Amino acid sequence: MGRARVNVAPHESLLAAIGRTDIVLLDHILRGAFEAGSRLLDAGCGSGRNVHWFLGRGFDVCAIDTDPQALQHVREAAGHRAPDLPAENFRVEAAEATTFDDGSFDAVLAIALLHFARDDEHFDAMLERLLRLLRPGGLFFARLASDIGIESKVTPIGGRRFHLPDGSERFLVDEKMLIERTLRIGATLVDPIKTVNVQNARCMTTWAFRTARRDVS
């Protein structure tokens, strides 16, 4: 399978092609992180903005969310852009309890999902279940809130949950935790851990890695 690129048909505007895809995810698409024809899951998909580009471009797109209305929106978008995708690809379920088969995906997206964890146990339950879905060498791409760069501006409320300057409450990771989890999984970062500071109101960190490949020797 070849690496997918952002190709825009002559009749298609750039906005129509990429929609509201997260700019950090778009960066990885541009750099060929996703193979055309691969199977991809968007966990906690919301309205589906991050599957917009993948739909109708040969990807076997799947999505889960606990919000039935949000998932219905994704189903409708898929119906227009990728009508051959089966309805069972889109399921109302939580990340830690998804019913997709283990080892059935080439890539899993978890964008603005893991920072809704209630505590460490819930975070690890979501992470471990999603990792079981990946084939060896699969790509895990997460974007989540962290305290990196705003450590003195967040207020702990217990269990790695914090009040943020933007008024929200989130489960916040830090660099040490992400590195430790990466090593524990036996994965390899595809990029250094990168964080965007949104005017000291919140910080969003990108955590992208590939799981270990099986030794075929």
Image: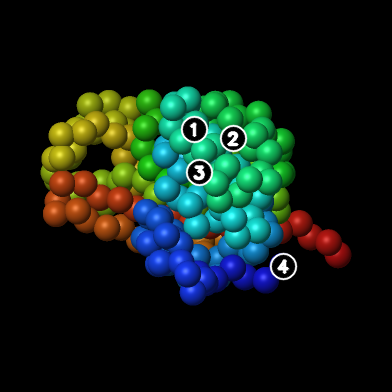
Question: In terms of depth relative to the viewer, which is nearer, 136 or 42?
Answer: 42
Query: Is the Cβ of the residue at disc 1 closer than 8 Å to that at disc 2?
Result: yes
- Which residue lies at the image location 86% right of the left edge and 65% below the top edge? 217
Q: Disc 4 or disc 1, which is closer to the eye?
A: 1
Q: Label for residue 90?
A: 2
**Mark closer to the chain start, 3 or 4:** 4
Q: Quadrant of the N terminus?
A: bottom right
Q: Disc 2 or disc 4, which is closer to the eye?
A: 2
| Mark 3 residue element | helix
**Mark closer to the chain start, 4 or 1:** 4
**Mark closer to the chain start, 2 or 3:** 3
Q: Disc 2 or disc 3, which is closer to the eye?
A: 3
- Amino acid at dot 4: Met
| Mark 4 residue element | loop
84 left or right of 144 in image: right
Q: Disc 1 or disc 3, which is closer to the eye?
A: 3
* Residue 192 visible to an observer of this rendering: no
- Amino acid at dot 2: Phe
- Which residue lies at the image location 15% right of the left edge and 40% below the top edge? 166
Report the Cα–Cα distance between label 3 and label 4.
Answer: 25 Å
| Mark 2 residue element | strand
What residue sits right under mark 4 in the picture?
1
6 left or right of 107 in image: left
